[in-house]
Image: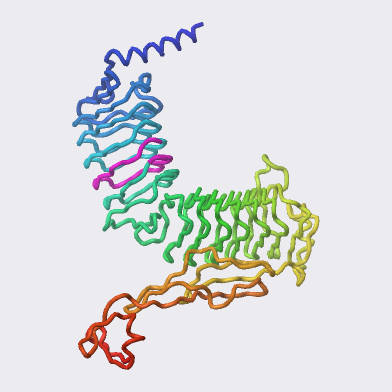
């Protein structure tokens, strides 16, 4: 009975709060007043930080408008967290910082303007503001915190001003309606390449590509690391080019990229992080280079379309559940002389963690001299058909597609007899002064795999549209020249003389 009465009292108190003004203090020289759904913060100085709930928390569902008057210098931690009915916020020009979790889960907030006085936006400041469609970040802001706009699913545009020098991890993760991030021209710290935010030296991918509709990305050759959650949930991504400059692929980097069919990991990569390719259900082939020494836990888990896996001899450890539920595997090849160490959590699974839900009767091909080692090694011994790597082992070959200049477009290991398919972006060749170029196909017919093969992009040239004045002073269209002006010398751009 007491609990029911307390619940009734709180409900009535919240209702009364919408009819009569409520007030209190929220800082040494600050007061708050709630009247008719409008919460006003007045006075001078910094707001208090709150661990769980603000003084007006009991009325939070009734707050529709927040007015922070001039004189207030900071918005405290958790200040307006959970004000689910909040639709309008006015921040005074004296506020310099927005605290951690300040507007977290304000699910009705559609827009907010941050004044030019603010220099920092705290961790999780606007997380789960699911109705937020736009926000203006002024040129005074220097730092954006961890998960600051995490899961703001309605956010459609945002501009990173050139004052920002620090952006926390996952700051825009889950912003599924945001097609790209705009970086102010001249920003000394960041640059935007096709919707992907990099630090200025282009050595680290800072924020994953926001737009989920893009089908391919080409990462610049200067990038050295693909950070955690980089392409998480990019379900339309079918291909990606990873350059040889990349040395590490972070955890969940390609998690849930359900449209990705193949990927080539360059031989510069030494580590593949936790769940890096987990749930890539369309992935049928992946090339793990001989430079990789460790494969993280759940790295390829739930890749239900993966038909074969080759683990190079450089790998010394494989994390828990790395190939969990790769149910379409028909064979596994492990080239390591010494069986890679299996890491798993014994308090979860007593055995078989790395290859859980994988048919243990499929062939496991290993070096001939190592068969007995594998038969005795933890989890490897669960395979009942351990065979030597010989000429009868399913043969795989490297199939490479390159551009006109020899730059690699796509490379993958494929089994003999399978048909190569190019899944990358359409090759391009820059126009020059006289021609534009259109991709016409490959230098030879793409045929079923019988060995290593390289296919080179070829292009047809098209005259640039325009006119040329001949040495006789006659102006003609370029596309007429081969047909109507044979044998006539003409000058291009007044300097170069040619004879047709």
For the stretch drawn in magenta, the main secondary structure is loop
Residue 160 is covered by the magenta coloring: no
Q: Is residue 196 left or right of residue 247?
A: left
**Image height of 228 relative to 106, above or below:** below
| Front-most of residues 64 and 213 | 213
**Image height of 280 relative to 31, above or below:** below
Q: Write down the quadrant of residue 129 in the picture.
A: top left
Q: What residue is at 63 percent from the left and 74 percent from the top?
A: 452
Residue 149 is covered by the magenta coloring: yes
The furthest residue to the top: 1
**Image height of 409 relative to 170, above or below:** below
Whether residue 129 is visible, yes or no, is: no
Q: Where is residue 58 shown, x and y percent of the image?
A: 38, 19
The furthest residue to the bottom: 487
Q: Where is residue 77 shown, x and y percent of the image?
A: 35, 32
Q: What residue is at 48 percent from the left and 73 percent from the top?
A: 440
**Image height of 232 relative to 477, above or below:** above
Q: What residue is at 36 percent from the left and 78 percent from the top?
A: 463
Magenta span of residues:
130-154
């Amino acid at each position: 009975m007491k609990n029911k009465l307390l619940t009734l009292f709180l409900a009535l108190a919240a209702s009364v709060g919408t009819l009569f003004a409520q007030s209190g203090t929220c800082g040494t020289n600050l007061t708050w007043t709630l009247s008719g759904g409008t919460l006003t913060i007045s006075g001078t100085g910094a707001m208090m930080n709150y661990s769980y709930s603000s003084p007006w928390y009991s009325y939070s569902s009734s707050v529709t408008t927040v007015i922070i008057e001039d004189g207030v210098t900071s918005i405290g931690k958790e200040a307006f967290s959970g004000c689910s009915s909040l639709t309008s916020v006015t921040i005074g020009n004296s506020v310099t910082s927005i605290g951690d979790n300040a507007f977290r889960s304000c699910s009705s907030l559609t827009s907010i303007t941050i004044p030019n006085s603010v220099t920092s936006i705290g961790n999780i400041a606007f997380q789960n503001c699911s109705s937020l469609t736009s926000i203006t970040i002024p040129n005074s802001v220097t730092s954006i915190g961890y998960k600051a706009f995490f899961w703001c699913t309605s956010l459609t545009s945002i501009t990173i001003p050139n004052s920002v020098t620090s952006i926390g991890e996952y700051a825009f993760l889950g912003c599924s309606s945001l097609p790209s991030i705009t970086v102010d021209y001249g920003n000394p710290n960041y640059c935007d390449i096709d919707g992907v935010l990099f630090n200025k030296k282009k050595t680290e991918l800072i924020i994953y590509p926001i737009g989920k509709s893009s089908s391919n990305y080409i990462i610049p050759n200067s990038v050295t690391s693909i950070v955690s959650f980089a392409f998480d949930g990019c379900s339309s991504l079918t291909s990606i080019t990873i350059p040889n400059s990349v040395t590490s692929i972070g955890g969940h980097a390609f998690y849930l990229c359900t449209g990705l069919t193949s990927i080539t990991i360059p031989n510069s990569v030494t580590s593949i992080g936790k769940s890096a390719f987990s749930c890539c259900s369309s992935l049928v082939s992946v090339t793990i280079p001989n430079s990789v020494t460790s494969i993280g836990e759940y790295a390829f888990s739930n890749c239900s379309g993966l038909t074969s896996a080759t683990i190079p001899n450089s790998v010394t450890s494989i994390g828990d559940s790395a190939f969990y539920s790769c149910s379409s595997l028909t064979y596994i090849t492990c080239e390591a002389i010494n069986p890679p160490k299996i890491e798993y959590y014994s308090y979860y699974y007593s055995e078989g963690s790395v290859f859980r839900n994988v048919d243990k009767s499929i062939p496991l091909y290993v070096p001939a001299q190592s068969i007995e080692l594998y038969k005795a090694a933890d989890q490897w011994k669960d395979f009942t058909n351990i065979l030597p790597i010989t000429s009868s082992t399913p043969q795989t070959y490297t199939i490479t597609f390159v551009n006109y200049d020899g730059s690699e477009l796509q490379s993958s290991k494929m089994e003999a007899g399978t048909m190569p398919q190019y899944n990358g972006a359409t090759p391009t060749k820059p126009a020059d002064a006289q021609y534009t170029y259109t991709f016409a196909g490959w230098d030879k017919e793409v045929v079923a795999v019988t060995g290593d093969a390289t296919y080179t992009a070829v292009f047809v040239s098209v005259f640039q549209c325009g006119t040329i004045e001949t040495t006789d002073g006659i102006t003609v269209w370029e596309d007429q020249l081969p047909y109507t002006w044979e044998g006539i010398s003409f000058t291009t751009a007044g300097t170069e003389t040619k004879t047709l």
